[in-house]
Image: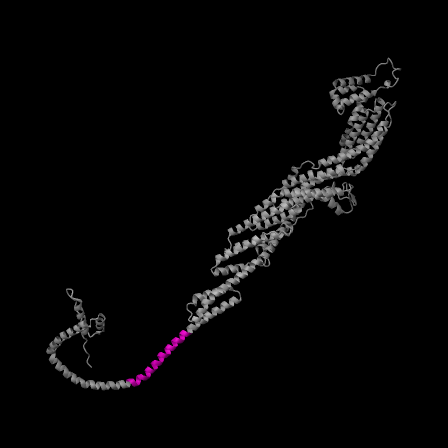
Amino acid sequence: MTSTKTRRRIVPAASENGDTADKQDQLLLSATICNGEDLGSFVRKAFASGKPETLLHHLKHFTKSKESEIEDVCRAHYQDFIVAVDDLRSLLSDVDSLKSSLSNSNNKLQNVAVPLLTSLDAYVEAKNKCSNIVLAINSLNTCVQLMELCSRANFHLTKNNFYMALKCLDSIEMNFQDKTPSTTLKRMLEKQIPAIRAHIERKVSKEFGDWLVEIRIVSRNLGQLAIGQASAARQREEELRIKQRQAEEQSRLSLRDCVYALEEEEDDEIDGVVDGSNGVNGISGFDLTPLYRAYHIHQTLGLEDRFKQYYFENRKLQLTSDFQVSSMTPFLESHQTFFAQIAGFFIVEDRVLRTGGGLISKMEVENLWDTAVSKMCSVLEDQFSRMQTANHLLLIKDYVSLLGVTLRRFGYPIDALLDVLSKHRDKYHELLLSDCRKQFAEALAADKFEQMYMKKEYEYSMNVLSFQIQTSNIMPAFPFVAPFSSTVPDCCRIVRSFIEDSVSFMSYGGQLEFFDVVKKYLDRLLTEVLDGALLKVINSSIGGVTQAMQMAANMAVFERACDFFFRHAAQLSGIPLRIAERGRRQFPLIKARDAAEETLSGLLKQKVDGFLSLIENVNWMADDPPQGGNEYANEVIIFLETLVSTAQQVLPVQVLKRVLQDVLAHISEMIVGALLGESVKRFNINAIMGLDVDVRLLESFAENQAPLLSEAEANQLKSGLSESRQMVNLLLSNHPENFLNPVIRERSYNALDYRKVVAISEKLRDQSDRLFGSFGTRGAKQNPKKKSLDALIKRLKDVN
């Protein structure tokens, strides 16, 4: 076979000088025909434009142009054509042989290719099936993975593992919902996923609601436990202070056999309970898992802000309901539950604030606390205004202070609560004073004013040592008869209880140094209440010397007890004793003490007056002075000696000295009063000498008390007779006019009133002045002593 020549491709010439579009189309058609290309586009264009005549005209024009060219070519190549025809004829035989050869080859090819084509068709069909199977397997795998996630989500739902279930739903939405080949599964997912989320939200909300109900009970128990632990810690502090005070007391008494021991603090237990290091959040049932779970689920659902608002509103409603105070139950019985509920509420909120991951803000907690403080202050103000019992007020104050201590550890400010407690300090003490006034009255009314009889050592310790009113550190023999009556320990117990209650109220109230306040109210208790109660009893119930003596002895013991009261108040207030002793005041029961001694002295004076009435039997114009003293003096001495022997068993020495001195002064006054009285018109020197013996007997009695008192105190006791002694000395003096000398008068006659001297001196008569005595002595020289005395009387009258 010969290879044919490739025809030269004709390109239409560019139009010149702006040939028309018709001319251009004609050229394009000619070039296309020359190139042997498809004329379909021209035909379609002609019919589309509705001008097929133009296309036909162009074809005819092209035919005409080619006919002339053919003629030219034929003329030019006619010989070549003839040659070519000859060649073609010769070639025709070759073509026929080739045709037969191709036919044979085709038959052979058909015979060979038919099985191959059949195999190819089978292969193509198998490949298509394989592709379909792979597609189906991939779809099945997707569905299997989807169903596994759905199954896992259902499993988590049945186990209430909502977070993992939501994660499965998120994975399904992200990876499978749009790629699921099954429209049924896709519709199921579109319907069930929102339903499952809504179910989870309802389920979690229900669990959160159950937690809200449960946490109220848990909060109350938690608050009671936390406040109880604070109370236990306070008790341990008090015990430590007691041991410290005992050690200080032993040191003050110079006791060397002191044993000191270190004790471990147990505050870790308290911290564990409150802070949650012991067990589940520190208390059985104090579990925040449902809350955090609900918060986490709502975060996962994209509802975080709504849940925060829901939580805050519900907790605020719970707090508001906790503020309700039942009118059916006394506040004294319900106050612990009331405050424990609030304490537990804010302990829980503190935990949520610290571990909740932003569930509640610090500002929200502070707002809740401000609301709670305002309400608690209002409740306390209302309840305190109604209370009329100091003990009730103290119980509530103690619990409120424990509440403050508990919540202050969590950073909550409690100043407002402490201000309310301080505001009612005066009312509490007034109620306490009123209670003590009743107790004093009852104790004094029950006293028989007899010395206490103690059989056992514990009675001595309870009634004497506990108030430090013993006179010796040596334990006495038992049975022991105390110098005081039951009033003393009973009143001491009341005062000690007052001090402890006052310190208890002032303690933990935000005021560090409150000893001055306690001391002020202690002064009021002693000076107003106890002193007044004692004065009332002294003025109304004392009817005999024995009772008056016992009351005076009691007052001496009270003087020692008052020192103990102020020391005890200082110790409980944490004030060193040396500082407390600097501001020690005078004996606060001085009015009652003076009244008791005056009452005793008055009763003794009444007894003495009975003996002094015998002074009427004195012979004022005796011829000779009595040798052993007058009768009244002997009777008085016997009475006083009996009195001293009895009183020294009961009365302290100083009290006995004051009473005896008062009685002796009264006796001295009565002797002078007898000389001054109207019943004695005149007397002589012998009567005065008899009085001198009487006064000497009384002075001897006073001097004999030196072993009991002291020599100086005996002399001071003797000074009670100074008026009668100086009057007798003046009347017996040879130079009575010395009374006019200021120096001598100040030294020897300072107790005498010149008016009494004049009145008594005028009654003195000499022996020569007796009736009818002047007849035998007429013309005799006047007695110089009488002359001096008359001069003294004249001078004193002139001065007067």
Q: Is residue 786 above or below residue 393?
A: above
Q: Is residue 660 left or right of residue 155?
A: right
Residue 349: image quadrant is bottom right
Where residue 643 appears, x then y in whole percent? 81, 35
Is 132 contained in the magenta span?
Answer: yes
Which residue appears at 49% of the width and 67% of the height?
Answer: 153
Front residue (pair 390, 585): 390
Q: In what quadrant of the picture does the C terminus appear?
A: top right
Query: What colour scheme has been applied to the protein in the rendered image?
Result: one colour
Above/below status of 342 relative to 543: below
Q: Judge whether 202 appears above or below 437 on screen.
A: below
Q: Is residue 498 visible?
A: yes
Q: Is residue 528 magenta?
A: no
In the depicted view, which residue is nearer to us: 354 or 291? Answer: 291
Q: Which residue appears farthest toward the top when viewing the image?
A: 779
Where residue 43 sits: x, y (%)? 21, 73
- The residue at the far left in this view is 75
Percent x, y of residue 427: 64, 43
Pick the front one: 667 or 461: 667
Q: Which residues are magenta?
A: 109-136
Nearest the eye: 798 or 787: 798
Say whether residue 676 is left or right of residue 579: right
Magenta span: helix, strand or loop, mainly? helix
